[in-house]
Image (cartoon, rainbow, N blue to C red):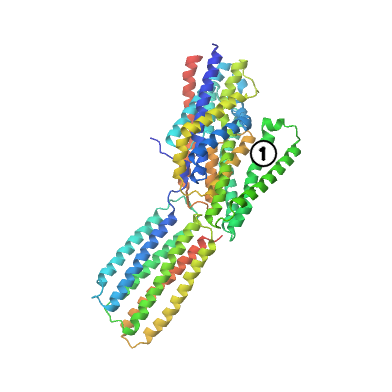
Amino acid sequence: MMKRLPFFGLLSPRSPMKGLIEHYMKIDECLNIIKDALECYVKGSEVCREFDELSNEIDDIEAHADKIKRNIRNHLPKRLFMAVDKTLFLNYTRGQDNILDAAQEALHWLGMRRMEVPAEFQKPIIDFMDQVSTTAKLLQPALENTVKIVHGEALDREVCKEKFRKIRDQRDRVSREKKVLISKIYNAELDFKDIYQLILFIECLSEMAKNCETCSDTLRAMIAR
Amino acid sequence: MHIYDIFLYLSLAFGFLMAFNLGANDVANAMASAVGAKAITVRQAVLIAGTLNFVGAVFLGSHVTATVSKGIINAEHIADPQIMVVGMLSSLLAAAIWVFIATLTALPVSSTHSIIGSILGFGLVACGPGIINWYILGGVVLSWVISPFFAAGVSYLVFSHIRRFILVRKNFFIQALRWAPVWVALTVGLVLLSFVYKTPFGKSLPITWWQGLLFILVFVCLVWYATSRLISRLMAGADRSAESVEFIFRKIQVGTSCYVALSQGANDVANAIGPVAAIYMIAREQVILSQAEVPIPIIALGGVGIALGVMIFGRKVIATVGTKITSLTNTRGFSVDFGAATTVLAASNLGLPVSTTHAAVGGVIGVGLARGFSAVDFGVLFRIVIYWVLTIPIAAFTSIILFNILSAIFL
């Protein structure tokens, strides 16, 4: 039996760009869990699920996301020619994966040892988490719009660029708040281990925002003329 | 009934069968991009392809017909006209069988390769390598290599232009209104150039070449003006969105589908009618003529065969291939069609029988290289090229077997 080979089989039936959105959705899941975990950690385990349980969940999501990433990267046929530069595409998958790695790392530092988060830092840390979460959530419409432009489903690059600008602005906000928060923690009368643990947790959250900006820059390069 | 009459009727039947397969396979492949991009429905594709292939075959096609029947084989090397007749019959049948198998299995093979491969097979077995006009065959084979590259180049340039001057511009909608009429005018201009300078009808017009050129220029300007007005009126109040730009090109793609069908009729009819014409000459004169006119009724028979092939079998192929292409937008589809049709029409004017399927594949690659598609799998291209190359020995071998069978019956 001869293989059916209509010549429009040249066009790959599924765009690899769609895989990026699937991978992003794992980041979205992670964000909600980190927020839950942080609140749980700050307020104690009576009001939410066990911290360890949440931590395991995030490991599972990260593992699943890693599988999606490997699937995207390893199943790109060797001779596949894409609408965007392959290096940019692979860089983006790495950037998006780094967001998840940073999230996992953040939770890792939070769960390193049990500590009491001083009342004065509870709200600022949760607010900081919200700012980081906002940065990551801004990446989704930017990614979706970029995919549409690359596929020719949308043409207005200005709308897309505005989405990148929002991510950049948000990341600047996160960066400024991180400096203030770290400075406050460092100058607080706390056990040095607590200071170290909190600062590293905040650094990891900030790293998430930074990776979001890197992803946004890569997306910007994808739609360059 | 004279033996030559039997040969003639058989050749008409086999030629018709070949034309039918052309309609079912090549034509369907060529129309698929327009259907895939939702520019036309399957029913419209069948109507356009059926009608315009016939028009292209009858009014633009006689050049190529002469090349296939007379160019590949040195007729004077065959002493017995009956050998030539049986050879052409075997070639027709062999090519028709292979293209039919290709239609059933959805292989993108070329009917042009098939017929030339089978003529080559018969020539080699009947009279040895000396009968083959290697110089002309070399040119034809070279055109097969060049045509996908040429189509890819044209499609690449067209889509790059659309991308640079429309798609990435801030005022992309205005740019689309500005450039779309230019593409329409250019398409009409190319068809007119070929019609006025290359067809028997155009040549019979009582005008000098510069008068013809002036007429074409004036007509093209009128088309540009009329299209500008029409598109502006049609798009008045439309959203300034990607969908509106695609809508403009969707309408234009109806025109380029016609362009594809017309140029395909001009070129591909030769694949079926070339050998029939050769047999007709022998049946009429009972000698092998070095030069002869191909009668219009025979070309018309090819046109009808192609049209019927599209209507009866091509409908299914168009629907299958067309619905499989989900990533084809109208700007991309237009670029593929324009590249393929321009290549086929240019080759037709040069008397070179190139494959529409190859040109269409070239068009897809060209747009892909201009980063028009989300992903083009060059691994598939490699497999397609293998089938292209295999077509020649398969058609030649089948033709040799059929020649031996028919020789045993008739000679």
**Which of the pair B180/B99 is nearer the observer?**
B180
Counting from the top left corner in percent of width and height, residue A222 is at: 50, 60
- The quarter of the displayed image where residue B207 is located: top right
**Which of the pair A131/B231 is nearer the observer?**
B231
- Residue lying furthest left: A46
Counting from the top left corner in percent of width and height, residue B73 is at: 59, 25
Q: From what the image shows, is residue B373 above or below residue B308?
A: below
According to the picture, the residue beneath numbered tag 1 turns out to be B192
- The quarter of the displayed image where residue A36 is located: bottom left
**Which of the pair B210/B133 is nearer the observer?**
B210
**Whether residue B137 can be seen here:** no
Question: Disc 1: which chain?
Answer: B
> Which quarter of the rendering shows the N terminus of chain A?
top left
- The residue located at (48%, 71%) in the rendering is A168
- The residue located at (34%, 65%) in the rendering is A29
> Which quarter of the rendering shows the C terminus of chain A?
bottom right
Counting from the top left corner in percent of width and height, residue B270 is at: 58, 29
Q: From what the image shows, is residue A176 above or below residue B213?
A: below
**Whether residue A168 can be seen here:** yes
| Mark 1: amino acid | Leu
**Residue neighbourhood size for the residue with mark 1, other residues' Cα within 10 Å, grouped as few (<14), some (14–19), many (≥20):** many
Is label 1 in a helix, a strand or a loop? helix
Q: From what the image shows, is residue A117 above or below residue B154?
A: below
Counting from the top left corner in percent of width and height, residue A76 is at: 42, 53
